């Protein structure tokens, strides 16, 4: 008997952000699920901006 194991391809999502002051930054999300990778990249980018703006500590 041959065992078959499904392996999902790793997906990387790159999101580029820019604010009204001209500051740019990028984040990458990595997952076997494109939706998960997108959410990771998006939330990381938003958190980075909030941390550097002093909104959250």
Image: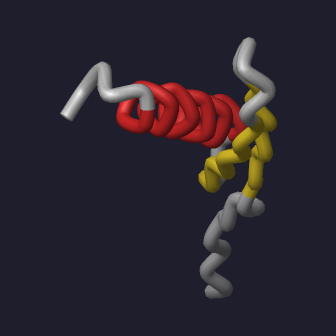
Q: Residue furthest front?
A: 21
Q: Residue at x 72, y 45 (%)?
A: 26
Of 22 and 14, the residue lying toward us: 22
Total numbered labels? 0
List x then y, in percent, for residue 45: 57, 35
Q: Residue furthest bottom?
A: 1
Q: Residue at x 79, y 26 (%)?
A: 22
Q: Quadrant of the N terminus?
A: bottom right
Q: Residue at x 73, y 33 (%)?
A: 23
Q: Is residue 18 above or below residue 33?
A: above
Q: Residue furthest left?
A: 57
Q: Is residue 17 above or below residue 11?
A: above
* Scheme of image coloration: secondary structure
List x then y, in percent, for residue 16: 80, 36
List x then y, in percent, for residue 39: 57, 29
Q: Quadrant of the C terminus?
A: top left
Q: Is residue 29 left or right of residue 19?
A: left
List x then y, in percent, for residue 17: 75, 30
Q: Residue at x 63, y 48 (%)?
A: 29
Q: Is residue 28 above or below residue 41?
A: below
Of 7 and 26, the residue lying toward us: 26
Q: Is residue 1 left or right of residue 46?
A: right
């Amino acid at each position: 008997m041959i065992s078959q194991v499904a392996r999902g391809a790793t997906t990387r999502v790159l999101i580029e952000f820019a604010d009204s002051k001209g500051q740019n930054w990028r984040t990458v999300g990595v997952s076997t699920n494109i939706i998960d990778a997108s959410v990771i990249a998006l939330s990381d980018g938003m958190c980075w901006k909030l941390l550097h703006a002093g909104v959250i500590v």
